[in-house]
Each structure stands twice: as C-alpha cells, then as structure tokens.
Amino acid sequence: MTIPYRPIAFGLFALAFAALLFERAQAGGSHFFPPVSDPVVREECGSCHLAYAPSMLPARSWQRMAGDLKNHFGDDASVDTATTARITDYLVANAADTGGRRHGGKLLRGVPAADAPLRITELPRWVKEHREVPARDWKEARSKANCLACHRGAERGDYDD
Amino acid sequence: MNSSQATLLTLAIALSLAARPASAAARDELLADYAVTAKKNNPAFAGFSAARGGVFHRKSFAGGKPDTPACTSCHADDPRAAGRTPAGKAIDAVAVSVSPTRYVDPAKVEKWFRRNCQDVLGRECSAQEKGDWLSYMLSR
C-alpha cells in the first residue's frame, strides 16, 4: 500500500492554518473566554452559577479562592481534598496569567500584582466595560455575577453581546 | 452489523437494563439509612411521609439566609419544573419523574442537603426531614 503523504501533509497544513486563523479571530476581540472543559470543575463550580472561565482571574486568585471554599461568598462550596486539588490545578493552569493569557489578558489591566481579587465583577476592566449598563438591566439580572442574564452565549465563552 | 458492533450493542442493552434497578436500589438504601437515624433520634418514628415532605419543601424558615427562606427559593414550587439559583443558574427539576438520574449518588445528595439546609434553615436537616423530602420527590 502506498501512503499519499503529500495530500496528507497538505491537509494537515491547511488544518493548522485554519486553526491559527480561528484562534487569532477569537483572541482579537476581548469577548471570547474558553468555557470550563473539565467535567469535575463544571459540576462543582457550575451548579450555583455559571462555571466562570478560568481565564477571567489570575492564578493567585484561584489559589486563594480554592483555599477557602467553605466560606465562599457566604456559601459552603467545599469539596473533598482530592477534588479541591483537581479543581485548583485546572483553574491555575488556565488562568488569565497562565494558559489562558491569550484570552484573559486585558481583564487583568489595572490589577496590582500583589492583589488576588476574588470577584471578576470587581476587576477595574470589568467595571469599565459595564459602566454604561442601565440600572434596569442590573435589576433584572438580580446579580452582577449572573453573566448569563445578559450574555446568552456565556456558557460557550462568548461575551460578544 | 459486525461482531464487535453486536457485542457493543448487547453490552449497551445489558447496561441500560442493569442501570435501572441499580438506581432504585441506591435510593432505597439511602432512605433506609435515613430511617435508621430517624428511628434512633425519635423512637416514635413511623416512616417517611411524602405529604410532609411537600409541606417542608414549601415552608418558609427564619433561621437561614434572608434571601433563601425556603427550598422553593431556588427549586420550583412544582418539583417537576426547573428552578433557579440567586446567581441565575437554572436547576433541573428535582422530581424523579422528570429527572430520573437524581438521588443515586449518596455523596452528592448529602453534599447538597448540607449546603441547602444551611442556607434555608441555618442548620442541618434531620434524617426525618431528608427522608420526607426525598419521599416527596420520589412520588412526583
């Protein structure tokens, strides 16, 4: 059997090129934040609210949050030690200043390196992007943390509307 | 169909058949555990009541968080409908007729009783309350 190397190579090249374009298109705007892909993180961090994209906070924030899940914004979000470790590893690896840098970069503007903010909704950049949102919309969403109320595509990582 | 496909299909059928009684058994076991504890706490305990569970589901308590006084602050009044958390996340129906995969993982059930009872009542739920509530959900 002869293997058609050239068509395969060409196909692979075209695929890689398309992937590159796609990635650039997504990284170009500040509106794509890859959604959580780990099923355990989605389950444990996505039941009470949207499973927030790891690229929206720096690694040190996720570490700080994971260190006290028992007192999580007034809720008990704690899980066993092994699960906590798995969740922390995933969030830290895909954070705004690690693996998720391409996507989260701008959101970290104005956050001092010594700070480990726990709220996306208190990042200076987030506040700025939402300055013009009318009070009526906030009231309807009930909570700023309810991204889905205004960003229908948030589960897919899409904040373009 | 080749033989490996046939094997897979047989396996899938066997699994789906095996899964049903297993989930029912897991729920029975959980209820039996709650019954043992309920009996220990109260010798007059005479079994769980779905009707009592329905009342509990809708009752407003004062001991928990002000914005979540009842189970129905997040779960729908009609357990066959979807609910919603304060942060806007939808919750699948809690009635077993609509969500047949619920209550088969005791660790998950206990985790949420722990969190939600704290939110609503400001304390843990008793075994009797848990058993009544579960019986109600199994009956709906």
Image: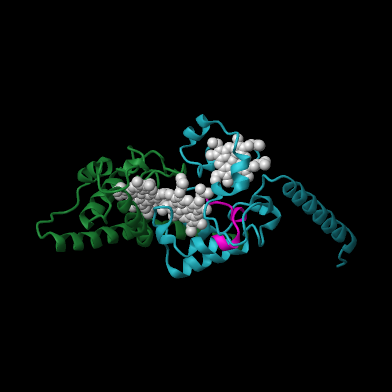
Chain colours: A cyan, B green
Foreground pick, A58 / A22: A58
Highlighted range, magenta: A51-61
Q: Which quadrant holds the C terminus of chain A?
A: top right
Choose between A60 and B13: the one closer to the eye. A60
Asked if residue A41 is positioned above or below residue A143 in the image, the reply reads: below
Which picture quadrant has residue A101? bottom right
In the image, residue A46 lies in the stretch drawn in magenta? no
Which quadrant: the N terminus of chain A?
A: bottom right
Apparent side of residue A18 relative to residue B72 in the rendered image (left or right):
right
Q: Nearer the viewer, residue A85 or A5?
A: A85
Q: Is residue B96 visible?
A: no
Q: Residue furthest bottom?
A: A82
The residue lying at 52 percent from left, 66 percent from top is: A86
Q: Residue lying farthest right?
A: A6
> Seen in the image, is B49 located left or right of residue A59?
left
Q: Is B62 rendered above or below residue A113?
A: above
The residue positioned farthest toward the left in the image shown: B44
- Identified at 86% across, 61% down, the residue is A9
Q: Position of residue B9 (x, y in %)?
A: 54, 58
Can I make out residue A18 in this image?
yes
Q: Is residue B104 left or right of residue A130?
A: left
Q: Position of residue B115 (x, y in %)?
A: 35, 55
A52 magenta-colored: yes
